[in-house]
Amino acid sequence: MATAQTEIRVTPQIAAEHGVTAEEYARIQKILGRDPNITELGIFSVMWSEHCSYKSSKVHLKRLPTRGKLVVQGPGENAGVVDIGDGLVAAFKIESHNHPSYVEPFQGATTGVGGILRDIFTMGARPVAVLDSLRFGEIDASSTTSEEEAARNRRILDGVVRGVGSYGNCFGVPTVGGEVAFEPCYSQNPLVNALALGIARKEDLFFAKAKGPGNPVIYVGAKTGRDGIHGASLLASAEFTEESQQKRPNVQVGDPFMEKLLLEACLEAMKTGAVVAIQDMGAAGLTCSTCEMASRGGTGIEIDLAKVPQRETGMSPYEIMLSESQERMLLVAEKGRDAEVLAVFKKWGLDATVVGEVTEGGLLVVRDHGKVAAEIPAHPLAEEGPVYNRRIAEPAARKESEKDWFRFSAEGTDLAANFVKLLGSPTIASKRWITEQYDSMVRTNTLAGPGASDAAVVRIKETKRALALSTDGNGRWCYLDPKVGAMHAVAEAARNAAASGARPIAATNCLNFGSPEKPEVMWQFSQTIDGLKEACEALETPITGGNVSFYNETLGKSIYPTPVVGMLGVLEDANKVLKIALRNEGDVLVLLDGSAEDQAAHLRDPAREFSSSEYAKRIAAVVAGEPPAIDLAAEKRLIDCLVALAEARNVESAHDLSDGGLAVAVAESCFAADGFGASLKIEREATAEYALFGERGARAIVSVARGKVGAVLATAREYKVGAREIGKVTRENVLRIEYAGQPVVLAAVARLKDAWERSLERNLKIQ
């Protein structure tokens, strides 16, 4: 069938302007058997973009473990799904919206949240929680950050946080947790990763597979505009340049109130039994929803753009197909039952129009007022894009020796003053200013919101169970050793879930990297995949899906390789959730150490390991060495032990040791309590700084009623976890730490809390 004539004649130069290489263009010509017209070129350019096709990451992602006894749906659908018992399933996924959030922080963040929520309810699941994982450049001027740059970073932070809060609050889903970190490399490339969780009955799941030739294809939701055109191909699949601010038109504009209506209408329409398939119009908009549903179902789809609701006049087929306007869905209904579906959306005041039908033959046919604007085989478009086995080359070894490592302080150093400074580090400091902008309690399911527990915990109504969610990732550690850093990300996320009392069962990931065209970036990526694979297999947490975000670099400078892991855990009894707050005067503080049975796991050069810590960075501006060694068997032992302790109700609180080490963990447990302090006696270990602030994994601090200490120690022995009493909870409202018999910290909890709680506001210049 001949295609309609267009005013623009496609040339290799125009293809290159669309991000299509000469080889890819030749492949398009071969698939079509002719030259593409401009609309077809645009369609191929977005579907074959890095953001949509994963053309540089596919060969590596295949190594990840994606199957497990609880996995109902792994990668390849809108969200991963796991069985959580009682006939219920949890759908969850994390995705990035990094580039749009730099160009337009507020809208970039809002549409990131909106997009991940649609991924969840597209599966037939009602969203119950959102988490965010954010990375920004430094917000206070320093030797590496000018005041002008810090001010820009503060503006980006403010816009992103307002955007996340605005969408979640207006939509009516709680933002229950997440994490925020600051490093110079994110100055012109913030990371905005959003995770959403939803619940459904297993039999009510929906999938994006078109079937039934003759079945009507229905467009629902917001009208199509010109916002977001080429957002996937020319914004999310390219590095930033000095002209990046001109890409504001590529950033979508969100409407959370309309999305709330869309949620309710979609779930109600699904209950009619008339809906066959459904797909979110996410990246690449109408293009991805049509070709992906057709490809997955082994069918074709034909639509007429004249029937698509439009909010702007004179839109071309190219613009309509590439628009990324938000709050839109594409449905396939049973033939003869489209009226039922249309009636539901009319009830909710939303546009709903039959725009085409499912066909045989596997073609995506796009008409405009009856004339063919594009005709492309759906499966090659959606699933047979280019796959690159990019060149991998390990970066040149860092020019680093012992003189570059952190030098442990001499005797007499004021560790208490350094401790106060560390608590004020933006990465460690309280995120109250951020989380107070989020409604974390809407829908009344939240059992542990931001900062209350190591993981966010939400109840599953009408059951005894609860779900725990945590996001974690340390870009600095991945920069120093991407494989070990990735393993730590999985381990900490799982450890956080276990410290809340939940057993970790599955993971999702968002992989944020620089340009895949650089061999050293692909080496980082490949190493990260190996680390994720090894850790997820060891901890029995398959990866059910996620997102890859490449080209996170500006003017040729890449971010740290930053894999973010979202971990899902199940708590069999919601009443047994553990929090970090100390609860009772006289409770014993017990340090659990999963690697204590295998001391060789962490007998390394302490100075080299400590040089990668937050303390080394904050106190001495050192970023060097290597991450702590990781012992996955030790992590698994600790996780199992924590879950058993929670199940038996043998501990009053639990907090894992991570950023800032033991001293910070105990201080945070004091801050979360009401009027409690702690007295610690720490045994000699390398140096006082290493013992107090070292970030070696597989450890947690628990508070235990005096009468249950024996039971806790017995459980620890059962799981081959080291356990020793290191202190007690007091009513003095003072934190007292002795190291090797000598007092090193004696400070009022109120003074420490002020440094920790007000740091972010002070850096943001908020009075």
Image (cartoon, rainbow, N blue to C red):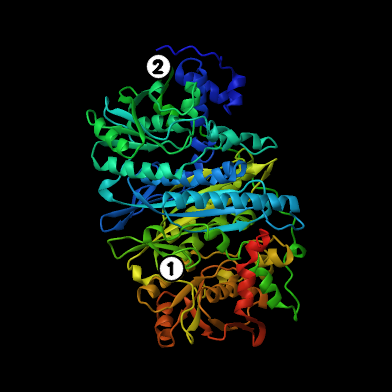
Disc 2 is placed on an element classified as loop
- Residue at the spot 40% in from the left edge and 41% down from the top edge: 76
- Residue at the spot 63% in from the left edge and 46% down from the top edge: 189
Rendering quarter of residue 83: bottom left
Relative vertical location of residue 537 with respect to residue 670 in this rendering, above or below: above
In the rendered image, which residue does mark 2 sit on? 369
Relative vertical location of residue 714 with respect to residue 211 in this rendering, above or below: below
- Residue at the spot 59% in from the left edge and 72% down from the top edge: 664
Disc 1 is placed on an element classified as loop
Q: Between 147 and 342, which is closer to the camera in this rendering? A: 342
Rendering quarter of residue 242: top right
Is residue 671 in sight in this rendering? Answer: yes
Q: How far is mark 2 from mark 1, CA to CA?
A: 57 Å
In the rendered image, which residue does mark 1 sit on? 500
Mark 1: which amino acid?
Ser
Is residue 75 in sight in this rendering? Answer: no
Q: Residues within 10 Å of mark 1 (few under 14, many from 20)?
A: many
The reply to whether dot 2 and dot 1 touch (C-beta < 8 Å) is no
Q: Position of residue 88 (x, y in %)?
A: 29, 55
Q: Position of residue 345 (x, y in %)?
A: 32, 37
Q: What numbered label is drawn on residue 543? A: none
Q: Between 152 and 134, which is closer to the camera in this rendering? A: 152
Q: Is residue 546 left or right of residue 445?
A: right
Q: Position of residue 120 (x, y in %)?
A: 39, 47
